Amino acid sequence: MNKILGFSIFAIVSSAVIFLSVATTQGNYDDAYEIYRYATSDTITNTEADTITLTPNLFSFFKSNHTLYADTISGTLQINVLVQESPALTGDEWYQVDLDSLTTVQGTLSQTSDVYGLRRRVILTGVGTQVSTYTLRSILKKDYN
């Protein structure tokens, strides 16, 4: 789910009314608790890879949890889960934070870590021959310590 932020500007110029509306989209962010929530579902076929970029830019210290639930439609389930961060605002430099593999049908894999970079992404890569569905849920909580 995305939160839509919008504003409108009205102006009267020489008996003409000008209306300008701007809307931006960002991840589901809870202002009261300073939490980003992401959820995405898709299908991995064979050795396909899906890259999910989670955050625009994190300028404070955050803690993260990524939970992957997967089930197989056919073949043998194996999905490698790579978590990466970037120290660059543009996200063109990435380094590995965590790497794990989910091989249990109707199984769940959870990865928790501190977020030191400005951007974060999760790359899900299928291994072998399979058609598997997955749901990735990620939570990034601002850390006040």
Image: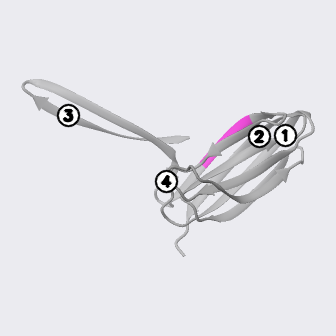
The answer to which of marks 2 and 1 sits earlier in the sequence is 1
Q: Position of residue 82 (x, y in %)?
A: 74, 52
- Check if residue 53 falls in the magenta segment: no
Q: Residue at x 74, y 59 (%)?
A: 98
Q: Residue at x 68, y 49 (%)?
A: 122
Q: 4 above or below 117?
A: above
**Image quadrant of residue 72?**
top right
- Give, as a three-letter code, the residue at label 1: Asp
Question: Dot 3, how many residues are within 10 Å of its Cα: few (below 14), some (14-19), or many (20+)?
Answer: few
Question: Dot 4, how many residues are within 10 Å of its Cα: few (below 14), some (14-19), or many (20+)?
Answer: some
Q: Position of residue 134 (x, y in %)?
A: 77, 40
Count of labels shown? 4
Q: Which residues are magenta?
A: 38-42
Q: Please, which residue is most extreme toward the left here?
A: 14
Q: Residue at x 87, y 44 (%)?
A: 78
The label number, if any, that marks residue 134 in the structure image = 2
The answer to which of marks 1 and 4 sits earlier in the sequence is 1
- Image side of residue 32 versus residue 6, left or right: right
Task: Please state which of the two labelled residues, at mark 4 or mark 2, is closer to the viewer.
Answer: 4
Q: Secondary structure at mark 1?
A: strand
Q: Position of residue 101 (x, y in %)?
A: 83, 52
- Give, as a three-letter code, the residue at label 4: Leu
Q: Position of residue 26 (x, y in %)?
A: 48, 44
Q: Say which quadrant the N terminus sits in.
A: top right
- Whether the residues at callouts 2 and 1 have beta carbons within 8 Å, the answer is yes
The answer to which of marks 4 and 3 sits earlier in the sequence is 3
- Give, as a three-letter code, the residue at label 3: Phe
The answer to which of marks 4 and 2 sits earlier in the sequence is 4
The label number, if any, that marks residue 124 in the structure image = none
Residue at label 4? 89
Residue at label 3? 10
The label number, if any, that marks residue 71 in the structure image = 1
